[in-house]
Image (cartoon, rainbow, N blue to C red):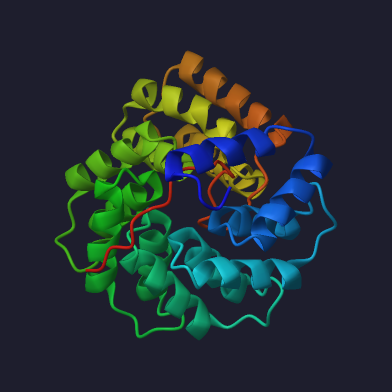
Amino acid sequence: MNQAPDDTLAANLQRILDGPPEQAAATLRAAAEGGVAQAQLVYGQWLLDGHGVARDPAQAVQWFEHAARKNDPMSLNMLGQCHAHGWGVPANPLLAAYWFRLAALGGLDWGMYNYATALTLGQGVTQDRAAALDWFRRAAAAGHAKSSNMIGSFYEDGWVVEQDEETALAHYLEAARGGDFRGQFNTARLFIARGQVGDALPWLARIPETATPAFLRKAAAWLQSWIDATSRNGPAPTPEAIATIQRLILHYAQHPGTPAPGAGVPAPRIHAPVSNQSS
């Protein structure tokens, strides 16, 4: 398997993942021990999640390190995640930023997003929002929806750019169309602020498809506070719009949400390796 072309390797590994989890985990481990970087990455993720194998974050870190030695960008990113969240190693924002930066330089959109987030917040690196915005823009250009949402926040708040609500909304819409629940909520929030409740409703309806339980609770609280404020201060939206939003609040409360796999951890699908680019 280690000698197969990238596309063939990706297809073979995906077939393994689609099988029974315990059997797939055993096969993945064998491929990982054989030096297949993508198998090392996915087996490490399964060890983190306890999927098909007993959960073992410390061993997961070791497999990510094996794949990272081959300059696998997602493995570099996952090492950053482990050091950021204390998965299998002590939490260390300095090391997290180091690995995120390498993943970003390797051309990985998630690495760009996570490194940009570290730069925005000054986590493990000196805060540099101008550099962060540049990395968010690179990731967004690669189709990374969450990065588009962050660019919208920069424009809405006026961080290192002129405050511009129209540009913010354009980026939130891009994120929303890309499936980012925060982008969907921010799009709806700006539409509501403009009195365009009808334009907000479709985006509010889509949020539970991918949002975490914690975010759904926050979104429901914001919508309820908006209803309370409009009932006191006006102008009030139509009774139909209020009824729809109240139904959405109830739906948010009852929806289980999507458990967060950790910031910047994509779905475990196999693909041909990303080329190691520098910038």
200 is higher (above) or lower (below) than 77 = above
Going by the image, does 107 lie left or right of 22? left
- Residue 214 lies, with reference to residue 207, above or below; the image says below
Residue 133 appears left or right of 98: left
Residue positioned 51% across, 41% down in the render: 10
Image coordinates of residue 265 in percent, x first then y, are 55, 54
Q: In percent of the image, x 72 and y 60: which residue is there?
A: 48
Question: How many circles with numbers are drawn on the protein?
Answer: 0
Quarter of the image for the C terminus: give it.
bottom left
Percent across and percent down for residue 181 are: 48, 40
User: Can the viewer see residue 257 in this picture?
Assistant: no
Evaluate whether residue 62 shows in this view.
Answer: yes
Q: Nearer the viewer, residue 72 or 113?
A: 72
Residue 129: quarter of image:
bottom left
Residue at x 55% of width, y 59% of height? 37
Q: Nearer the viewer, residue 10 or 145?
A: 10
Q: Is residue 207 above or below residue 77?
A: above
In the foreground, 95 or 201: 95
Give percent across and percent down for residue 61. Answer: 66, 71
- Residue located farthest toward the front when viewing the structure as drawn: 3
State left or right for residue 154 relative to residue 246: left
